[in-house]
């Protein structure tokens, strides 16, 4: 299973690279697979590569769902917890 995350581009770097914000953590990624990315755009990132640009509203909805899932997971007891 693969997981790709929506990330906001905070800085464009030389060599088709960018700095993105992933839940408050900065990460350098490659933009080699996506054209016309600007600071403030959201991109879907998988293993260090932006795969596509994403609409801001959709990115924010997805990030809110991830946050909600994280909160629910923290509140739910697991089958292996004692």
Image: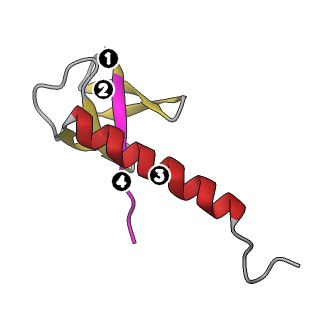
Q: Residue at x 72, y 76 (%)?
A: 78
8 vs 65: above or below: above
The mark lying in front, picked from 4 and 3, is 3
The part of the chain drawn in magenta is 1-9
Query: Which residue bears the numbered disc 2?
Result: 17
Find numbered disc 2 in the image and state the secondary structure of the residue it sits on: strand
Q: Residue at x 53, y 58 (%)?
A: 69
Label for residue 4?
A: 4
Q: Quadrant of the N terminus?
A: bottom left
Q: Residue at x 17, y 41 (%)?
A: 33
Find out whether residue 11 is within the magenta segment: no
How far apart are labels 1 and 4 at the CA level?
A: 21 Å
Find numbered disc 3 in the image and state the secondary structure of the residue it sits on: helix
Q: Is residue 62 visible?
A: yes
Find numbered disc 4 in the image and state the secondary structure of the residue it sits on: loop
On the picture, is 10 further left or further right than 23?
Answer: left
Find numbered disc 1 in the image and state the secondary structure of the residue it sits on: strand
First in sequence: mark 3 or mark 2? 2
Are there few (<14), some (14-19), or many (20+) residues within 10 Å of tag 2?
some
First in sequence: mark 1 or mark 3? 1
Query: Which residue bears the numbered disc 1?
Result: 13
| Residue 13 image point, x, y percent | 32, 17
- Report which quarter residue 21 is drawn in: top left
Are there few (<14), some (14-19), or many (20+) residues within 10 Å of tag 4?
some
On the picture, is 76 further left or further right than 30?
Answer: right
Query: Which residue bears the numbered disc 3?
Result: 66
């Amino acid at each position: 299973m693969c997981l790709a995350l929506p990330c906001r581009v905070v800085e464009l770097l030389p060599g088709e690279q960018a700095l993105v914000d992933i839940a408050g953590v900065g990460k350098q990624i490659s933009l080699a697979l996506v054209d016309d990315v600007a600071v403030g755009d959201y991109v879907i990132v998988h293993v260090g590569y932006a795969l596509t640009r994403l609409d801001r509203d959709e990115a924010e909805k997805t990030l809110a769902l991830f946050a909600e899932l994280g909160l629910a997971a923290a509140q739910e007891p697991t089958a292996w917890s004692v």
